[in-house]
Image: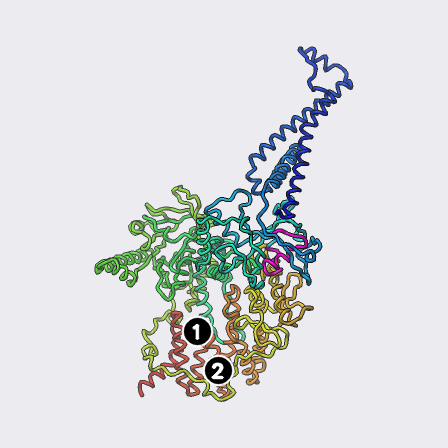
């Protein structure tokens, strides 16, 4: 039995076809009949000579002649219309397959034809489209018989601002989308792919009373997701010829595609979901499945391919698949004239961690001094690399916001890239050309600077292991490209002149030859060869970068002849070698071979301006505890950084047996009342408490358990961002920090506010006030309803040393602030914008405790005060175990209290933590423990 809506659509199509056919026949056949009856045949009298023709023209215009002229004009118009109809009929016949797939081709053709041909195109096109609608079979659907009392009045408005309170169940036709309704079903892989797509989308037929809000609530589980349905069906041509252009107007009988999320474990066959499914976690399934006689089962081959397709979607390699479908950029722009690769940015991300650690190690506790801000260029590159390394979320369709496509994943840790081609990074092996390579042009030095930075950042990713690719550069060229670096810095060696750089390259080739001989002499079989090759360290690849002089051309040419990947790369600037391949580098980094050979896609080299290169090298130097080298090279030994002096081979703590380590101190032996940092929750005075020191957590007044645990991670990040900026943020700043896709900012922020509002209103029952205040484009937490531990943390630290004579009040204020500091800011969340805030807050609490510890060491303190400071140091050391200043003061206070076992334990804990980073304690820290070890040996 046909559905009434389908029957109505067929009757409408038949009526349209009949009316259009009648109009077309009337124009084609009726007009000639009228002209023939009114004026006869339009042929004029026969004229045989020119004089007869002139005489005829000289005759006065009479009424019969005027009628003949008008009749002739009418016959010409009819002939032109007939030709246009024939032409349009041929066009629609040729484009019939396209019309079967998409009827918008008819509208596009009408918009493109001229005015004189529009009538014929309208008649023929309307007839063809009506016949297609009449001929096309209806979509197989399951019909639900509705009780008359359940049907509601016709509603043409959708997506109300406030959802209806008395929402009644609506009945509709739901059919899975196969995308094959425009033609006969094809078996095999095509049918399997179509059935696989049915898991992600369903076709929904609108009935009377439907709104997009209600449809989203029933099938997506959330009314706020109605824009997804609208976006997916916008401008879609419906059966009645109309389009969905206004979300407030939908008509019964329209077909809507609903993006139903794919379940975690889809069933092997298309079957109805169980009735006990929770609507909060998955969209409501269709009430009935398609009858078997209307939905024929696929062939066995198609079923097998469908099963294989489903298995592939459930594998653990989901992030690489997402990256394949949404391939992000491979290069990152730093300003107007700098470009680096995502692999280089990953090295800067690794260096940023060491930069923060060394800054905190170098920082002296002072209320007025702060850690210098990280370079904005480096911070931008590090954030891009952090976004690239995060796993791709396979459920982006369910996210409240749409983020920008992250960059491509960086290459392995020992990979160095020189540029980008076809949106793919090009490795440094591209330069390993027989005879060497020469760069010339205005962008040569900028590209060479980016190449050296790429080598240095790759070394950061390989710490504490030795870098696989190193570079040797003459001193004068290094001063132009990367000034301020010491002569030997990680993967870069500066030689006094080109002659010594050539000698270094020759020594590298000799070392390669020796390593090859050692690997080949004592090998017995292939397995032994592989084992020995993995155990023995290879010299790696050396880049010789120089601007040669005429005296060194022969030596460089000999070295360049042995240039090959994995061993040696010879690159010269502005001075081509005989037999070398020359690249002309433009200002934007495009490499143009001098030979004239053109690649289909040109190579664009990464490039850095001197200012950007200086920012990068300063970050790299600080990541190794050093400062930029002055321009003058003659420095007295005392002015060298402490890390440039050779360290002792072994400290006494490293040679001491592990069995001699003292047991961990027991806090139960401390006097009572000396535990000021208990992690109890502070008294809540407002309806909502937001904690961001530690994991982001929400509490409602009167409830001990956290709330909002089911909120999307984007909503938690949104709240943490507003808590970090209590004075508020503009919408543009929020979109930039959350990396929102351009053009989606307004909808994304609206969804975030709605998600927060819905959760907090359900927890508190407050509906008359907003928890997030919106003033134009300005977003801010409502501090009358929401309190944060971060605001209280800052307020308590400001009390510290407000009056120098009130030592007890300062200690109490710091203890209360430390009690709020349960962990780093947004602990466990890898927000791209939170690193600087996290480091700033850690610095503030550590400096406050260190100032108290220093004062206790210098002026002495009561026993109770010393124990409270020690507990503060232990509390922060548990959160930041690599903070050496905390360990130093803890060791001194433990020793002053006679607790040498606790001092030894604090030192060993610090040593283990620094060893994981590839460091060892400073000499000053080692000196605190060395006298104790010497005294023990004497005993």
Residue 608 visible: no
Residue 194 visible: yes
- For image coordinates 37% across by 66% down, the residue present is 464
Give the magenta range: 204-228
Name the foreground residue: 253 vs 576: 253
Kindly report the distance in space between the C-alpha atoms of the residues bearing marks 2 and 1.
Answer: 17 Å
Number of residue marks: 2
Indicate whether 793 appears above or below 859: above
Name the foreground residue: 512 vs 255: 255
Whole-percent x, y for residue 839 in the image: 50, 70
Write down the residue under mark 1.
882
Q: Which mark is residue 581?
A: none
Q: Residues within 10 Å of mark 1 (few under 14, many from 20)?
A: many
Name the foreground residue: 790 vs 936: 790
- For image coordinates 66% across by 42% down, the residue present is 11
Is disc 2 placed on a helix, strand or loop?
helix
Write down the residue under mark 2.
871
Q: Could you tell me which quadrant the C terminus lies in?
A: bottom left
Whole-percent x, y for residue 529 in the image: 26, 59
Q: Decide if residue 935 is on the left or right side of residue 243.
A: left
- Based on the picture, tell me whether residue 214 belongs to the magenta stretch: yes
- For image coordinates 45% across by 70% down, the residue present is 357
Whole-percent x, y for residue 246 in the image: 66, 51
Q: Decide if residue 150 is on the left or right side of residue 696.
A: right
Whole-percent x, y for residue 553 in the image: 31, 49
Q: Residues within 10 Å of mark 2 (few under 14, many from 20)?
A: many
């Amino acid at each position: 039995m046909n559905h009434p809506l389908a029957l109505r659509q067929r009757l409408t199509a038949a009526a349209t076809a009949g009316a259009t056919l009648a109009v077309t026949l009337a124009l084609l056949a009726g007009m000639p009949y009228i002209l023939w009856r009114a004026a006869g045949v339009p042929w004029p009298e026969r004229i045989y000579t020119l004089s007869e023709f002139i005489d005829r023209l000289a005759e006065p215009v009479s009424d019969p002649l005027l009628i003949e002229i008008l009749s002739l004009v009418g016959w010409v118009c009819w002939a032109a219309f007939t030709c246009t109809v024939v032409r349009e009929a041929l066009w629609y016949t040729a484009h019939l397959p396209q019309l079967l797939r998409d009827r918008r081709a008819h509208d596009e053709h009408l918009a493109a034809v001229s005015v004189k041909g529009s009538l014929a195109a309208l008649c023929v096109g309307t007839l063809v489209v009506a016949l297609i609608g009449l001929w096309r079979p209806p979509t197989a659907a399951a019909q639900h018989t509705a009780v008359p009392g359940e049907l509601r009045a016709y509603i043409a408005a959708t997506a109300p601002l406030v959802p209806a309170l008395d929402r009644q169940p609506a009945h509709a036709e739901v059919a899975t989308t196969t995308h094959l309704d425009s033609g006969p079903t094809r078996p095999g892989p095509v049918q399997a792919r179509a059935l696989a797509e049915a898991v992600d989308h369903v076709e929904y037929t609108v009935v009377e009373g439907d709104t997009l809000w209600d449809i989203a609530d029933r099938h997506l589980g959330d009314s706020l997701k109605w824009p997804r349905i609208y976006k997916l069906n916008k401008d879609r041509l419906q059966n009645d010829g109309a389009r969905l252009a206004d979300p407030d107007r939908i008509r019964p009988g329209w077909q809507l595609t609903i993006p139903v999320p794919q379940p975690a474990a889809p069933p092997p066959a298309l079957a109805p979901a169980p009735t006990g499914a929770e609507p909060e976690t998955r969209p409501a399934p269709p009430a009935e499945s398609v009858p078997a006689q209307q939905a024929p089962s696929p062939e066995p081959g198609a079923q097998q391919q469908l099963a294989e397709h489903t298995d592939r979607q459930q594998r653990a390699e989901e992030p690489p698949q997402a990256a394949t479908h949404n391939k992000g950029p491979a290069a990152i722009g730093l300003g107007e004239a700098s470009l680096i690769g995502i692999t280089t940015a990953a090295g800067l991300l690794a260096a940023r961690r060491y930069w923060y650690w060394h800054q905190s190690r170098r920082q002296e506790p002072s209320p007025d001094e702060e850690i210098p801000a990280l370079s904005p260029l480096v911070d931008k590159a590090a954030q891009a690399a952090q976004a690239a390394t995060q796993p791709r979320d396979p459920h982006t369709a369910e996210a409240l916001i749409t983020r920008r496509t992250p960059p491509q994943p960086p290459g392995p840790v020992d990979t160095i890239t020189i540029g980008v081609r076809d949106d793919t990074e090009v490795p440094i092996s591209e330069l390993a050309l027989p005879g060497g390579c020469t760069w010339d042009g205005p962008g040569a030095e900028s590209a060479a600077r980016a190449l050296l930075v790429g080598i240095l950042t790759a070394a950061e990713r390989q710490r504490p292991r030795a870098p696989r690719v190193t570079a040797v550069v003459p001193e004068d060229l290094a001063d132009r490209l990367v000034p301020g670096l010491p002569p030997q810095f990680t993967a870069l060696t500066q030689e006094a002149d080109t002659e010594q750089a050539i000698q270094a390259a020759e020594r590298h080739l000799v070392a390669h030859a020796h390593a090859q001989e050692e690997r080949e002499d004592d090998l017995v079989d292939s397995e032994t060869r592989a084992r020995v090759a993995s155990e023995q360290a290879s010299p790696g690849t050396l880049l010789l970068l120089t601007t040669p002089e005429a005296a060194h051309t022969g030596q460089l040419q000999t070295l360049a002849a042995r240039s090959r990947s994995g061993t040696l790369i010879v690159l010269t600037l502005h001075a081509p070698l005989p037999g070398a391949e020359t690249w002309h580098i433009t200002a934007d980094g495009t490499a143009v071979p001098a030979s004239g050979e053109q690649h289909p896609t040109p190579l664009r080299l990464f490039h850095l301006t001197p200012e950007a290169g200086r920012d990068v090298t300063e970050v790299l130097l600080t990541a190794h505890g050093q400062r930029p080298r002055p321009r003058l090279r003659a420095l007295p030994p005392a002015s060298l950084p402490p890390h440039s002096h050779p360290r002792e081979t072994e400290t006494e703590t490293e040679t001491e047996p592990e069995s001699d380590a003292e047991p961990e101190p027991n806090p139960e032996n401390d006097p009572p009342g000396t535990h000021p940092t208990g992690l109890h929750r502070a008294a809540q005075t407002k309806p909502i408490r937001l904690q961001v020191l530690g994991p982001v957590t929400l509490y409602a007044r009167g409830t001990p358990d956290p709330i909002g645990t089911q909120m999307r991670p984007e909503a938690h990040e949104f709240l943490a961002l507003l808590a970090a900026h209590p004075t508020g943020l503009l919408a543009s700043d929020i979109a930039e920090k959350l990396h929102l896709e351009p053009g989606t900012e307004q909808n994304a922020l609206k969804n975030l506010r709605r998600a927060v509002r819905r959760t907090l209103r359900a927890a508190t029952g407050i509906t008359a006030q907003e928890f997030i205040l919106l003033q134009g484009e300005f977003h801010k937490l409502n501090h009358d309803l929401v309190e944060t531990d971060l605001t209280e943390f800052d307020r308590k630290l400001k009390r510290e040393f407000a009056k120098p004579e009130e030592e007890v009040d300062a200690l109490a204020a710091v203890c209360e602030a430390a009690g709020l500091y349960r962990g780093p800011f947004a602990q466990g969340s890898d927000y791209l914008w939170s690193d600087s805030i996290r480091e700033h807050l850690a610095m503030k609490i550590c400096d406050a405790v260190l100032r108290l510890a220093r004062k206790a060491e210098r002026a002495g303190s009561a026993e109770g005060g010393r124990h409270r400071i020690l507990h503060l140091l232990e509390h922060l050391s548990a959160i930041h175990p690599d903070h050496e200043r905390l360990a130093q003061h803890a060791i001194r206070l433990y020793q002053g209290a006679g607790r040498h076992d606790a001092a030894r334990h604090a030192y060993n804990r610090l040593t283990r933590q620094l060893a994981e980073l590839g460091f060892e304690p400073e000499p000053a820290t080692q000196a605190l423990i060395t006298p104790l070890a010497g005294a023990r040996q004497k005993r």
